[in-house]
Image (tube, grey):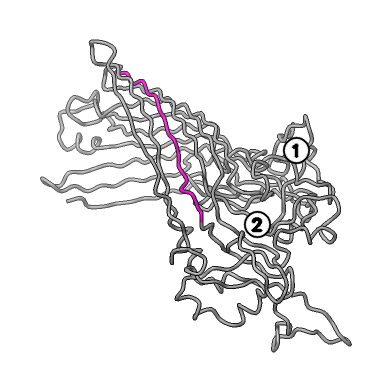
Amino acid sequence: MLPDYYAVVNGVGVRGAVAVPDAGMRLTNNIFAASIAPTPIVTASSVGLSQTLHTSQRSSFAPRIGFAWRPFGDGKTVIRGGYGRFIEAMLGTLTSAGWAVSASSVGSYTNSLVNGQPVLTMASPFPANLAQPGIQSFQLSADVNYRDPYVQQWSLTVERDLGHSIGLRVSYDGNHGSNLGYTKNLAQVPANTAGFAAARSSSPFPLWNNISQETTGARSNYHAMTIAGNKHMSHGLQFSANYTFLKSLANGQGFNPTAFATQAGGTSTDSYNINVDYGNVSFTRRHRFLTTFLYELPFGAKGAFLKTKNRALDMAIGGWQLSGVFVGQTGPFMTVIAPGADPAGNNFPNVTGNGRADAVAGVSPIPDNQSITNWINKAAYTIPRNNIGRPGNSPVGSAIGPGTQALSISLFKSVPIREGMSFQLGGAASNALNHPNYAIPNLNYNTAPFGTIANVQSQEAGGPRSVQITARLVF
């Protein structure tokens, strides 16, 4: 879609045009052309575009620099740091937006009854005039002046050898994303207090219901501190443990992010001000601790504290290996939505989706007696009134879901048969303590199940305890 293209069609001024590659003009079907009329369809060469429908950026600059310094003579301490600028070229979004332009147009027609009979039927589902104002949605359009997103990253790390094959590392990592991808509705009616019916003519593209434009201009900020300890294998033991405290904010994840944003980002609440979507990045964790370990039990082996003089007995009690993983983390950031509310007066819930609820100042989203039937404090939110000239004001990621605590362990015994061959028998248990790790609650405010949890987690071994018994021959 070319938003800044102006033309006069049959004496009527029209803003916007659909651009296709030169070879694509003959593939454009007549029904599509009729459905978007009087919006013109133009070829790339006629408007000075390349056949890719994209103006490539050729001025990207991506320097990298780093250092490592041993401040003390014993060589046991190292300070490292670095900075880099990383470019993300437009790949997936350009590909998806460059194919099947005709299929990107989706018309929504409202049926009616005449003399008790429906005007539109399965045999004839479309009206005679396909080009009815305000019913067409262009589901995927790419900004022809798409600027390459980039991320600046920096880090500072102090590492120390503590002896006994143990190392300690303390790190700070940060990055700032600029010109990141997000999606906006070019035809969105500006926020108003008159209501959509009265204000719909103020849309920049009144012929259209929605034009989903993939563009750039969003930003992100990430800061994290990590403390990590590692022990290399010695005396039958190795382990790794790390704790991370982080803060990650962005404004390109959309009005109601339910997963990490893709290259195209999410659909913004307000196409005229994407900063209203600035908040905690969905499904990040403020605190996270992870440890892994492997221990060869000191029974029956050379140098073990429990060893007999009977080789057969030593083989029976020896060869055991215990390993495990423990993860403990706070819950993901979530967004509370208000189904059906249209505070901006632009028909947002019907055109795009349910927007966010209003936040009640000074009230914590965490209830006093938090449980799976009362995970979010209902008093912390309210339904915004329609047509108040702004979207719901609760931030993206204003609520926090359940955390995760899961210990997974395995115990295996290896019996040597001959050189290069052994038999291994053992078992493994994920979430061995069967700690209940709950899934995210219902986030639809002003509905009966709001704030209740009906399921458990499945990721990171956080689900119900699962036990496996295995046997294998290794050769």
How many neighbours does mark 2 have within 10 angstroms: few (below 14), some (14-19), or many (20 or more)?
A: many
How many neighbours does mark 1 have within 10 angstroms: few (below 14), some (14-19), or many (20 or more)?
A: some
Which quadrant does the N terminus fall into?
A: bottom right
At x 15%, y 28%, the residue is: 309
Q: Are marks 2 and 1 in contact (CB under 8 Å)?
A: no
Q: Count the numbered circles shown.
A: 2
Q: Position of residue 141 (x, y in %)?
A: 56, 62
Q: In the visual, does 8 lie left or right of 327?
A: right
In depth, the one of 456 and 396 nearer the eye is 396
First along the sequence among labels 2 and 1? 2
At x 74%, y 75%, the residue is: 132
**Cα distance, mark 2 to mark 1?**
32 Å
Q: In the visual, does 51 lie left or right of 314?
A: right
- Give the foreground label among 2 and 1: 2
Q: Residue furthest top?
A: 73
Q: Residue furthest right?
A: 115
In depth, the one of 7 and 388 nearer the eye is 7
Q: Position of residue 415 (x, y in %)?
A: 21, 43
Magenta region: which residues?
145-161
In depth, the one of 84 and 74 nearer the eye is 84
At x 35%, y 35%, the residue is: 63
**SS at mark 1 in the image:** loop
Q: Position of residue 410 (x, y in %)?
A: 37, 41
For label 1, the residue is 377
Q: Is residue 402 above or below residue 37?
A: above
Task: Name the amino acid, label 1.
Answer: Asn
In depth, the one of 257 and 226 nearer the eye is 257
Kindly identify which numbered label has been placed on residue 185: 2
Task: Name the amino acid, label 2.
Answer: Asn
